[in-house]
Image (spheres, helix red, strand yellow):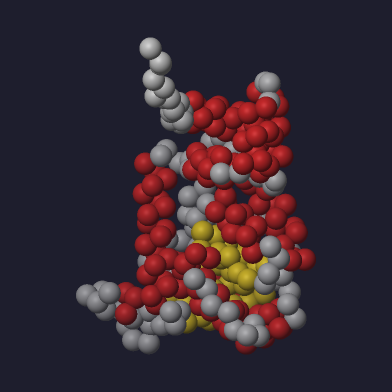
Amino acid sequence: MRKEELRIRKIYSQTHRQALKKDWTDKFNQELKIIARSNQNLILVIYGKQGSGKSYVLLFIAEKFLSFFQPPMKLTVDDCHFSNIDLLESIEKKKGHPGLDIKDEQIQTVGLGSQAERMALENVIMTVRGQKQSIFFSAPHFVGIDCHYTLKTWEMGALEPWDWNKPIEQQWVFTKSLIYSSDGDLLGYIVTKTPKDMELLKKYEEKKDQFITRTRAQGGSMRYMYILRKAKELMNNPEFLEDFNSATNKKLKAFFCTKHMGSSMLTIAETGILVDYIQNQMKRAPKPKKLKLNIKRKT
């Protein structure tokens, strides 16, 4: 059915027919090298149906891109994220050092604070170009992000006819993807192979499965975890505790939270929740016991 779908697409779309005659693989690899060696950054979007090879394409290009840096860099599972908040915190920690982060858009954040996350991400995408930080996005559907290139997985390939009695990853050799310019023009196609670091691919898929399971169990939002992390950071800051305890009303407490957090992606409502949580934790904290003085009275 996939072959028939591709055949029909080529019949009815002259643009696709022309694009599939243009192999951009070498040009794209050269572009990756130029970007890496000149300390620029790359915003890349990869999308396609489930099982179309997005993870293979994503990690292969990441390996290729990082190999061109001097010295070469290596992607780790800690650079792979599945929520906007984790991606944004990772970029903040790198503080402008060249590097690559991956964001898998498998599940969108919804509910309280999700709009603030998306706005913060849009702002970061516009500013990381000057900080030499690159971001690759992977999604099952087209994601409207201001990027340098967009790839759409088109066709998976093997050297021999598929044997459906064997694991598909043992036969999967290459993936053909359509490549679009930043203006959305279809340029041609590129061919990528399977990643060299299959152990990273395994960890990546495991981390993704854990995130999906955890997110579905929580009803789609993991914002509370971000609020808890911020609360822990603040409560370990003696200067914040001094200011917080001196505040005479909730607005002042919220102000001191914002002051000591620095940059954060909390909404006004979430900041109120943060204040309530910190107050609650302080009330529950055990109070220091008073020392009893054992003084004997003279008779």
Of residue 122 and residue 131, the one placed in the foreground of this image is 131
Q: Position of residue 37 (x, y in %)?
A: 71, 83
Which one is nearer the viewer's eye here, 78 or 213?
78
Residue sitting at 65 percent across and 85 percent down? Answer: 70
Residue 57 rendering spot, x and y as whole percentages: 50, 73
The residue positioned farthest toward the top in the image shown? 299
- With respect to residue 65, does 220 lie above or below? above
Residue occupying the point 70% across, 58% down: 125
Image quarter for residue 94? bottom right
As drawn, 38 above or below 130: below
Q: Is residue 51 visible?
A: no
* 29 on left or right of 279: right
User: Image point 37% across, 62% down: which residue?
Assistant: 206
- Residue 275: name its quadrant: top right
Residue 85 position (above or below residue 41)? above
Which residue is painted at 70% across and 46% down in the image?
Answer: 262
Where does the image place residue 217, in percent across and percent down from the top left? Answer: 37, 41
